Amino acid sequence: MDILIKELKSNSCKITPQRMAVYQTVKESIDHPNAEAVFKKLSPTYPTMSLATVYKSLELFSKLGLIQVINIGENSFRYDGKTEEHQHIICSNCSKIEDLNNDVFEDLTIKVQNISKYQIQKQQLCFYGICSDCIQKASS
């Protein structure tokens, strides 16, 4: 939370309990929630908070580099509290998102730079498939 407070102060943004709660919810989540899921989780504790506040907070945190935005298609955005570069795998059936082990992709950025002659600034790599839960449900 210290990082959040420092970033908000240095960018002249208000520090509100709602913003703190939105950030904490995304940071502690491993299921990469969308804005509606964050709102639903926080609404019992913050009944006056609007969905717009959640969206604005998530947009601000993304702009400040405090969270990652994962676009899973058709303007459907999910949020990740892990800001270091890492890859994701997304279920095409249920939209579950999981982090992938970064060791496999360690040299990928260097290889892409060498092939493309681009200076890579950041990367976001997603794989799509059917998760084991959906495969099991389909075979039942």
Image: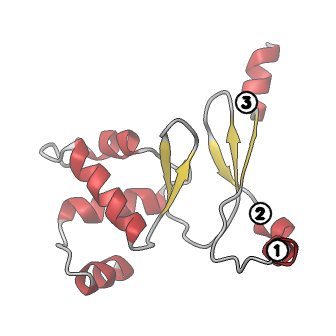
Disc 1 is placed on an element classified as loop
Label 2 close to label 1 by CB (< 8 Å): no
Q: Residue at x 78, y 33 (%)?
A: 132
The image position of residue 107, as x and y in percent, is 85, 75
Residue 84 relative to residue 27: left or right: right
Q: Residue at x 17, y 47 (%)?
A: 49
The image position of residue 16, as x and y in percent, is 17, 67
Q: Which residue is mark 2?
A: 101
In which image quadrant can residue 137 be found?
top right
The amino acid type found where label 3 is placed reads Asp
Q: Nearer the viewer, residue 123 or 102?
A: 123
Is 128 above or below relative to 130? below
The amino acid type found where label 2 is placed reads Asn
Q: Nearer the viewer, residue 120 or 50?
A: 120
Residue 106 badge = 1
Residue 24 relative to residue 108: left or right: left
Q: Quadrant of the N terminus?
A: bottom left
The image position of residue 44, as x and y in percent, is 23, 41
Label 1 close to label 3 by CB (< 8 Å): no
Q: Nearer the viewer, residue 83 or 48?
A: 83
Disc 2 is placed on an element classified as loop
Residue 47 badge = none
Residue 133 badge = 3
